[in-house]
Image (cartoon, coloured by chain):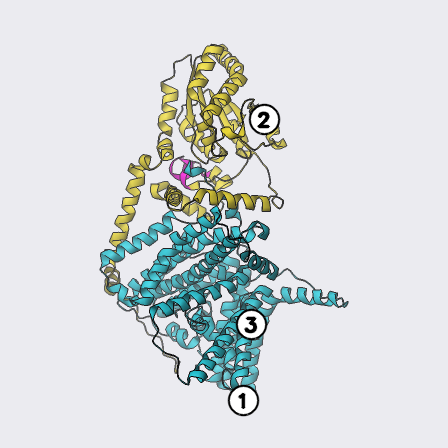
Amino acid sequence: MESEIEPQANIIRPTKRRRLFRAEFGVLLVVLVSFLALESIFRFRGEILSKDIAHLNSFDQISRNLAEDAHPNELRTLFLGNSLTRYGINQELFTQIIEKDYHLPIKTAKMNPDNTALADWFYAYQTYFKKAGRPPEVMIVGFEGNHLRDAPSNHLDRLAYYYGAGNDPENLDRFDLKTLEQKISFQLCRVSAAMANRDRLQRRMLDKVIPQYREGMDQLNGRLQIAGSSSRKEQISYERLLKFIALAEQDDVQVILVAMPVPEFYEFDTPLLEVVSSTSAQLVDCRLIPGLTNDMFFDGLHMDEQASRIYTTALAEKIGLDLKLFQAEKIAQFP
Amino acid sequence: MIASISWPFIAQNSLSCTSTTAPMLFNSFTFWIFYALVLMLYFVCRHRAQNVLLLIASYFFYGCWDWRFLSLIAISTIIDYFVALKIDSSKIAWRRKAFVTLSICTNLGILAFFKYYGFFATELITLGQSVGVPLLLPTLNIILPVGISFYTFQTMSYTIDVYRGDCKPTRSLLDFAVYVSFFPQLVAGPIERASHFLPQVIQPRTYKEGDFQVGLYLIILGLFKKIVVADNMAVLVNAIFDTPTSQLTGLEVLVGVYAFAFQIYGDFSGYSAIARGISKWLGFDLMVNFRRPYFAVDPSDFWRRWHISLSQWLRDYLYIPLGGNRHGELMTYRNLMLTMLLGGLWHGANWTFIVWGALHGALLAGYRYFVTSKQKHRGEEPAQYQTTLLRCGKMFLMFHFVCLTWLLFRAESILQAWEMMMVMTGSWAWTPTVSLITGMLMFCAGPLLLFEAWLEFGTKAEESFQIHWSWRGLAYSYALMMCLCFPPPVASSFIYFQF
């Protein structure tokens, strides 16, 4: 730097700025069109790409069918959970057993989006049953391990787009959206299906193009879980579960929490038992079902068809009487 | 079923940053909202107001990392501003020397206290204990201010340049403060020289026809490098380096090191590219910090391509003052070793970084010895012409030398690096983890490598702008779609912030 040059009032003129931009106008247009194409694919053809998208899109229909198609004397029962419920519950068999063995007419529906937990179910219930004015009479929530504990959703993006969670800013701020970055991303996902589903493409494609992708991920996760299990201490709380049960109680919905069987046994923690004892929710222990063996979990987590029949039968037998009693109470309360 | 694959545990192990508040990362929506607001205001301001805005924005940007350390930047700025003026106005040699010493001591003092005190105090205590002399040094739990190594080196270079007469000091504290704290390059460089950057701050901005175009290219390239390459590699690298060494196979360590090579490259060069891109839109030209380093054919070539701003800084303010290559071969080797050792230490207070620097020093010295003895033997300059095959062979060899040093750079300790190297001499079984990392490398880093090979062996970067807009649009769409659809489970901080 030889000498200082005095500053001059010389700002960029609008015409010149426009010209700068125009040079790349075509490029930006191509980028924009590409994004619109991706958005359209997810918005209008998402069902073809993923069964889970089809399922998420059908939430409103599921709740509508349960409310409107049920005969007045049928017990409207909702199975709420994730892929454990999807594979584990044989809806037809459950209905048959309850109707045949307990003489209880029942109408069931299943809401089981992938990789979800109470964080997601909470908003799904609020949006599609409570706020829509179509609450079921019984809600059977299938869980394992820490599904019911307070934790942000694994899929804030889907929460934004499919679950109508944006209408409950108070709980979002309290439980899910901790940072400004998450809040901005959440708002983007509310309006963009591509943003909300972006991880689907990633997993599907990587699973296709990388040999042993899944096995590799499992191997790494497994090793790290062993290495890190001793150092992790988790603060356990069930504040959201309490809110969830309270919401259901307001609508006279009986909540049944079903501890589902998985190959690795898990314990109930004391705070969960305290929540159950302090509310109207029932806890049904199906962690160990006679006849279920580890080789019936085809991918190490989900039940195969045979296991599903065994589990569904066991569950129906465990809660059949309760459902009947519940129905009787309902009729007795009817004015 | 696809959705049942989860990365929960790996995600928790990604690199953590040193900040105590929510940081503003270039790959975050928060940053881009901030930048859009700054840009809008910037374009309606005149030159002086633009500088005021840049200063406010830069301090706000840094304050988002940790507002407590803003005082350090302010102290460094004020001291160096006045010291430079004093040096310039003083005609007495010892006074000039005293002032430049004051600047160097202040900057290195800040750096030494915040970055190295804990390390050296612990090492001294350990050494004292081992020889039976208990030392009563307080061990403080000091938080490392983000980007401290970058801005202290930048301000130091200013006063040294003024002392040497290479640049005139500015009389405007505002301009100097903008030079020190300019937010695009504040926390991870490039380490700009006053002679290159300060005139750009002082003079009104001038825009060239292709500035928007180049800025867009650099930003998209940088985002791709950071989000698609670096962050995806980070997850895998962390998984490998967090796994007990006894559970790893040789091939797993090898692909883990390859993944780290691309993680650190994507991370740092991605940051530099975005910094250059957003600066371009603000009307500034930042220096090129990376020039396809994995295509280097020898150690000297590597350091002309990797973290160029630091390499040049070390050359101009350390290697040459030490004597450079002016005092015989032996002194040249010593100077190379010292420069690289300190360069290693600059990266962090850990023996792994020091050994990393020493290894690079040894590589540079060894290469120099090899080249000079070859020249003596042949009595002629090395052939400029190289066949592509020979060049590729050299690149392959150099890449693996660099990877070997990256192992030390990434390892938590020398012991871990040593154990991992030993593992590499053992079982080379092909496991699902090897398959996964190899696949991810090819999927994420492969396209980048191909693009760089295209630039390296054929087209010049500026020529790529001549390609029809529709093709460029498609290329940008691909890069952005990859950023959108293939992000890592958790966006991690830029690695170089911790240095």
Q: Is residue A302 visible?
A: yes
Residue at which label 3 appears: B341
Within 10 Å of disc 1 (Cα), the crowding (few <14, some 14-19, many 20+) is: few
Residue at which label 1 appears: B93
**Which amino acid lies under the numbered mark 3 shown in the image of this protein?**
Leu
Q: CA distance from mark 3 to mark 2?
A: 62 Å
The chain containing the residue under callout 1 comes to B
Asked whether residue A160 is drawn in magenta, I would say: yes
Q: Which of the chains is yellow?
A: A
Lateral position of residue A26 relative to residue B83, left or right: left
Image quadrant where one finds the N terminus of chain B: top left
Q: Residue furthest right?
A: B132
The chain containing the residue under callout 2 comes to A
Residues indicated by labels 3 and 1 sit on the same polypeptide chain: yes
Residue B476 percent location from the top left of the image? 30, 55
**Which amino acid lies under the numbered mark 2 shown in the image of this protein?**
Val
Is B215 in front, or is B7?
B7
The chain containing the residue under callout 3 comes to B
Asked whether residue A193 is drawn in magenta, I would say: no
- Secondary structure beneath disc 1? helix
Residue B415 percent location from the top left of the image? 61, 60
**Which amino acid lies under the numbered mark 1 shown in the image of this protein?**
Ala
Secondary structure predominantly adopted by residues drawn in magenta: helix
Q: Which residues are magenta?
A: A157-169
Residue at which label 2 appears: A276
Display colour for chain B: cyan
Within 10 Å of disc 3 (Cα), the crowding (few <14, some 14-19, many 20+) is: many
Q: Which residue is rendered at x = 57% and y = 60% of the image?
A: B417
Q: Nearer the viewer, mark 3 or mark 1?
A: 3
- Kindly indicate whether the residue at mark 1 contacts the one at mark 3 (C-beta within 8 angstroms): no
Q: CA distance from mark 3 to mark 1?
A: 31 Å
